[in-house]
Image: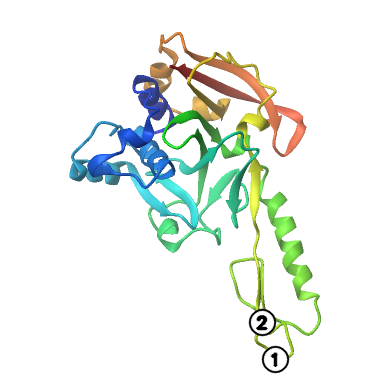
Amino acid sequence: MANILTAIKNLIDNPIIELTSHYSGRNRANGVGDALEKFTKDLFANTLFETDEYKKTLKYNEVFSYQGNQNNPPDIMLKNGDSIEVKKVQGNANALALNSSYPKSKLYSNSTMITEACKNCEQWSEKDIIYIVGNTDDSKLKSLWFVYGDCYAANKSTYERVKNTIIDGLHLIPNIELAPTNELGKIKKVDPLGITDLRVRGMWSIFHPVRVFDYLPKMDLNNNFKFYCVMREEKFNSFSEVDKNTILSIKDKNFKISDLKIKNPDNPAKLINIKFMEFYYG
């Protein structure tokens, strides 16, 4: 079954960093961001070199239960597996823009931020979420992070407390009309003529993984491309023995798996055990 370990194996076997040139021609991508999302799908579906678009479509249908839209998380969902959010950044970015969707340690089917198509694509209530963060220039992939949300973001109650406090505060403003919305709020008829509305939107962001996990020991080789993966030890242990052994048996000198500890996103005073993977190329 397609999962993060099979995707990592495909990446190591086929380290494609010239994204726009790889996704030119019939499978044309609209810029490097679009190419990064296509690359992510192909890593998980094992279709990096499939040129027949019909065969690729069938394989995507076999592997994914949902392929999202730009306005609602997630970007991709694996059938009976994890959800995936893909983020592209350029330069030494300090933060990832999440817009109206706060960071997620898990994805829940009752979230108001996901579409009905996502909620109904399969029978599910909760999924692990992988943040895939690619640093690019105009054509090339320079680094790639696979980070599970429960290693990266706090429990949803942390963010919803702030969100709900803001919404409650809007209701305390006298003599305004609040309209129903999935955003923080929409105030109708602000002025005496009743011709001005105000949308109140959340614009969430989160530090880039390279900054969040800057305390972890890394090989830090001087290569053109760097890959890192952060997952909880129990998540790694949940995969099949075949998939785990395939990763553990990789002999590439530029690939390494370490047993490390990271700060718990809900309480940094406590540490959680993780598997940390590194791969360098070029």
Is disc 2 surrounded by few (<14), some (14 to 19) or many (20+) residues within 10 Å?
few
Left or right: 100 in relation to 191: left
In the displayed structure, would residue 56 be above or below residue 143?
below
Residue drawn at x 61%, y 66% is 183
Q: Which residue is mark 2?
A: 196
Q: Secondary structure at mark 1?
A: loop
In this rendering, does residue 2 appear at all?
no
Residue drawn at x 41%, y 39% is 36
Q: Secondary structure at mark 2?
A: loop
Residue drawn at x 44%, y 15% is 248
Amino acid type, callout 2: Thr
Quadrant location of the N terminus in the rendered image: top left
Quadrant location of the C terminus in the rendered image: top left
Amino acid type, callout 1: Leu
Q: Which residue is mark 1?
A: 193
Residue 45 spot, x, y in % from top left: 32, 36
Q: Which is more toward the observer, 175 or 268? A: 175
Which residue is outermost to the front? 138
Residue 40 spot, x, y in % from top left: 40, 37
Cβ–Cβ below 8 Å for labels 2 and 1?
A: yes
Residue 232 spot, x, y in % from top left: 58, 29
